[in-house]
Structures are given as C-alpha cells and as structure tokens.
Amino acid sequence: MYPQVEPYAQGMLDVGDGQRIHWEASGNPGGKPACVFHGGPGSGSDPRWREDFDPDHWNLILWDQRGSGRSTPPVADPATSMEHNTTQHLIDDAEKLREHLGIDKWLLAGGSWGSTLVLAYAIQHPTRVSEIIIPAVTTSRPEEHAWITRGLGMFFPDHFDAFRDGVPEEDRDGNLALAYNKLLNSPDPAVRDKAAWDWSKWDLSTITGGDNDFEGTRYADPVTRYRLARTVTHYWGNEAFLEPNHIFDNLGRLEGIPAVLIHGRNDFGGPLYTAWEVAKRWPDAELVILNDAGHVIMEGNSMDEAITAAIHRFR
C-alpha cells in the first residue's frame, strides 16, 4: 500500500448530451497510465485506489461515470433524465477521456459492474488497452441479473420476500430491477424513498452474505442510496444495454492483452462460474481464485492483496 497522494490534475470533461464527467489524475504525470472503471453502476470513483498504485511509477486516472460522483447532471436528482446514460455512452466517454488526456494505451482495472465496462470498452478499443485487472468478474448477461435479483432468494429467503414484496403484486413475477426502476422514477418522493430503501436492503444483504444493516455503510445516506438504486436498476432492468452474450461472444478480440482475473469463491452476487468461463475463453487471462473472499474489496483482505500483486506484476 502506498500513500494516498492528492491528484496533480482534475477537471470536468464535456462529453455531449448535456453530460460532464469528472476526472482526476494522480501519481507520476510521465508514468505508466492506468485507469479505474468504478462499479455500481453509480457508485462513483474511490480514491482508495490511489493507495494501490505506486505514485512514483503510475499515472493513475480515476473518473466518475455519467451522473455518478461529481459528474453532472447528478442521477441523484429525480429530474435528471437517464436517456443518455447507457453502456455505449460510458464506453464513448472513457475513449474521449483517453484522447483528452493524450494517452496512447492504458492499463484498465475495475470490478463488479466495472468489470463489465472494462471488458466492453476493451472489446471495442483493444489497441488502446495494455493490460487488464479485474476483481469480481461480471459480464452483465441476463442470467447474471436474474440470479442476483431472484435466484439468490434460495440463500436469503427472508430478505428476498421483503425485496419482492416491495413492488406491486402484478410486477413480482417479472423483471424486478425494471419494476423497482419504475418506482424510483415515481413523481411521489415517498414512493421513491421507499423503493430506494427496499432495493438497498436487498443489495447490501447479497454483498455481505446476509447482513443488511445500513449503519456505517454508504447506504445510510439517503441521497447515495437513491443514486445507486436508480442507476443500478436502470442498467440491470435494461440488461446493461448489451446483447445477451456480448462479452462472451467477443472475448476473442482481447487476444494478446494480458489480464489477471481475481474472484472470491464466496461471492454470492457474482458466482465464480462467470469468472471461470471468461478465463476459459481468454487464454491471456490468469484466474486467481480466493477461497476466503466474497464480493467486497476491503483494505488488507485477500482480494486487496491479490489486486496489489497484479498491479506490481504489470509495472
């Protein structure tokens, strides 16, 4: 772990559609470029990543995806339209940011939703990617969304009943993410607040393995809770705006790009199977399986240590 240095540069990049994304650069301006695609969708960039990259060696870029973090207009405002917030928009934003910063190639890192976005970007722009590091591998296939919104009920039946019953009865057998997204865009603030609460209770329980106490978590803040719920349900409800097997069908485009995939065997929300299948189809990717890890990266845990080792490998 390295000191969490302050950015040497940051700004707001106009990417069109009335959207401006926040970015920051830290470390060595002349160092090897690396860029982190944050998860969520909607979580915003995490400055803790600065502690994983040696600031003397790396030129580290962090950015907030549309409507997240310090990017504008904020998704946390119910009046903000989500019309121009899709996976393709985010891929285009990342490419505009690379061009804006004058970077030829960069190492990409990102877990969970960030994994899907990293892979989708790399498939579209393989010549701009030097290496890839992915903790918590996802590809946002419809079956992955169905698993996390419905299949996990077999492990958390108590939490699932409350989660399912948070939507109108006529919507309970369908796409639950889409049903929640409708509630989160209701003109009634009370309906939006309850939907964000109910969705977040389920989300937290699947991440932690059953604990959904908001105290001390990001879900304790109602604004953060709403932003995350609205963004996640927008993407999951629309199957991430990707063809069902887009990532799997195009992994051949990543030939020659070395990668480290890191996955916890105890990841309820993103079962190891997805990472296993991606690694089988991508010969240049090494899969590191952590028997004691789940979905969450915490300082000093095995996931964090594996990420640090992968970053050092690609120096």
Image (cartoon, rainbow, N blue to C red):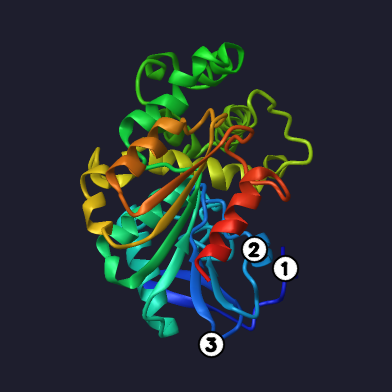
Counting residues from the N terminus, which is met first, the one under dot 3 or under dot 2?
3
Query: As displayed, is residue 131 above or below residue 291?
Result: below
- Which of the numbered marks, if any, corresponds to residue 2? 1
Residue under circle 3?
A: 30
- Which of the numbered marks, if any, corresponds to residue 90? none
Taking the spot 50% from the left edge, 49% from the top edge, the residue there is 111
Q: Are marks 3 and 2 in contact (CB under 8 Å)?
A: no
SS for callout 2 = loop
Instruction: Look at the image and tell me whether residue 173 can be seen.
Output: yes
Query: As displayed, is residue 209 above or below residue 63?
Result: above
Q: Residues within 10 Å of mark 1 (few under 14, many from 20)?
A: few
Distance from label 3 to label 2 (Cα)? Answer: 18 Å
Amino acid type of disc 3? Gly
Residue under circle 2?
A: 52
Q: Is residue 307 left or right of residue 5?
A: left
Q: Residues within 10 Å of mark 2 (few under 14, many from 20)?
A: many
Taking the spot 42% from the left edge, 72% from the top edge, the residue there is 106
Distance from label 3 to label 1 (Cα)? Answer: 18 Å
Instruction: Look at the image and tell me whether residue 79 can be seen.
Output: no
